[in-house]
Amino acid sequence: MRLLLTSGLVLAFSMAQAWGQNTTCTDPDACNYNANESGPCLYYTASDVTACAGDETTLEVTNLSVDPAGAPSSVIQAGNVSHAPFFVEDAEGALYVAAAFEGSHTVFGQTLTSTGEDDMYLAKLNAEGDLMWLIQGLADRDVNVGDLALMPDGGVTVVGTHLAAASWFGENGTNYSASFTSSYNSGHRDGYSIRVNGEGEIVWGLTLTGGSNEGLNGVVSDSEGNAIITGGFNGCCPSYFIAYLNGEENEVTVESFGINYGTGVLTKISPQGEVLWTNTCHNRDVGLRPVGTDADGNVYLSSNFRSWNNGTGMIHIDATGTQHTVSNPGIGRAFLLQVDGNGIWQWGRSFGNLGSGPSAAIYVADMEVVDGDVRVVGSYFAGEVDFEGGDVVLPSSSHYRGYAAVYDLTGDLVQAADFDLSDGGFNASAMGTAGGQDWLAGSFETGSNAPANEGGRDALWCSIDWSDLSLGEPQTFGGPDSDDISYLGEEQGRLAVGGFVTGSATSDNLQGEGGGLIYALGSEPLDVLVTWEDGTEGAVLPWTASETESVSFNVVAGNAICEGSILVSVPENECADSEACNFNPEHSCYTACVFPLIENDCGAGSVACAAGTVWDAQSQTCVVATLPYLNEPGEIAELNPCYFDTNYNGLVDVTDLMNLLSVYNTSCAWEE
């Protein structure tokens, strides 16, 4: 085997932009290690083969991979405002991107112009990075994006808020207009959701309105194509303590409960846009965003709440109107609850400390249901954090720490841990899986134990091992101002983050201008191509052996190239029968096999050989010890007369003649 080591996981990402490979490979395991020309690191394995003449065999180059380590990362300037874009990839590799912008903004070759303060757009790129379609959400003031979810039958559902009546115009003449309920608070918002199929057609729209600063914040799809959406509305300034879900086929009234500043709303919307059921969560403040589903259609909701008085639990009202209480030993907590696919309460758990501040000193940033567990991440400060349903207690902290908790599907705590990545403060904001690795992201302020910081608040991400909640080495990006990550995703096997930069980013990992961006590790994917000496392309080459020879090939990825060869060894014909005297165990090619006179005795017959001859086991005959011929290669053999000098006196004389007569009539076998 020729020694050419292979690489590990290759991360890849395809975008409309092309990103060059301009570094020299410095990995000694790569076949182009220290190559003079620039390029990514290239790896392969090739093994020599042995084949008999005329036999068909296969030559193969395996473990082909390319690692663009050190190459610039790809960046999509998705928006020009400080809002993180959201994105998701379907099974065919198409990418959906939803982002906000203001004024004039060019993206994917399209120049967009907002009608008010901020507008939003939803775009689809195919697997090659070409723009398929783009829908713009327009309003006289502001339209932004809160979340999006891939739907199982194609397309996505997007949620967000708007500050004025808004309109979306889809492909093939489809459209949706969202009305707006004004109030004396000019900062009041309404919530919206639109469902768009894979062809860019708007299937349905939905609003949450009522004059009390409504919003739709999170969305996930279940296996049947229903959209599970979270949101809420305020109880102050002004508050009507009531809101309305305006679906494509029906309108549902959502009422507040008790005296509060915030009511959380959970709703299930059919593939046709019908509001199927609603749940509500009530306390002084409840805001809902992270939501997930399991394979059985159960819905998981996690967020945080604050109470007016110490010990007042959060009230949850399910689809039947039944009230349930989530416990609260302090001023407020975070919580995790489960309802079934019909919106009926199953269980609820709270976690956190005794609470202080507007978010009870703990908040939930993201949640996922993975492999029979519910994963929750967020941040906390102040007192110790305990978990209902478990016995883990996280330490108190004077600054924000990240945390992760894992519950099983019955509400029991599996494990939890805190992440003190900066004593200046670390806020976990998102988690996800990409390239077979789990990731955690957030933002941090500089501190004595913090990673390098470019100034202000910087963005951070690292790997996370959910088996023991350990973290990998953090990576950061940012500029002199405040930067953040709000979303993690996988794009063609590579980790990508959705974040924003408020100024110019000048870190080692990111060079770019301010605004919303999609930042993907490494560079765009490269195909690894094998070309054989006869021009055949592909890693496998059918081959008929005729003689021993070296077959050369090239391995190419981008502007990196490696030359290689496979030695095809064709042995001389050998006997493959182990019972034969001329058996050769190293080769299996076929030739005439000679068997002994006596079974299993290749030396039988040697007693019949006269003087001057020896027994040849392979031919089973007597042969002379030395051939009495003089000849050069290619010449006709002639007898060597000195062969008859039997007494070695340098002369053929009478003595030699008498010696010859003494063996007269002896039978001899001569080797040709």
Image (spheres, grey):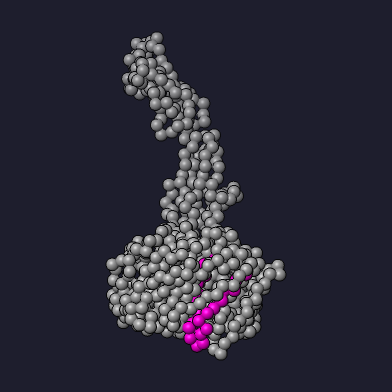
- In front here: 485 or 661? 485
Confirm whether residue 224 shows in the render.
yes
Image position of 11 (left or right of 326): right
Image position, residue 166 (x, y; %): 63, 79
Image position of 120 (left or right of 354): right
Image position, residue 549 (x, y; %): 51, 42
- In front here: 148 or 433? 148
Instruction: Identify which residue is drawn at 40% across, 12% down.
Output: 667
Image position of 391 (left or right of 200): left
Q: Quadrant of residue 640?
A: top left
Image position, residue 20 (x, y; %): 54, 68
Instruction: Identify which residue is drawn at 47% across, 49% down.
Output: 46
- In front here: 258 or 637? 258
Q: Is residue 542 above or below residue 424?
A: above
Image position, residue 321 (x, y; %): 47, 70
Query: Is residue 399 located in the magenta-colored stretch of the structure?
Result: no
Image position of 295 (left or right of 76): left
Instruction: Identify which residue is drawn at 40% across, 70% down.
Output: 324
Q: Which residues are magenta?
A: 227-248
Confirm whether residue 27 shows in the render.
no
- In front here: 366 or 50? 366
Q: Residue furthest top?
A: 665
Instruction: Identify which residue is drawn at 48% across, 83% down.
Output: 235
Q: Residue furthest right?
A: 173
Count of residue discs? 0
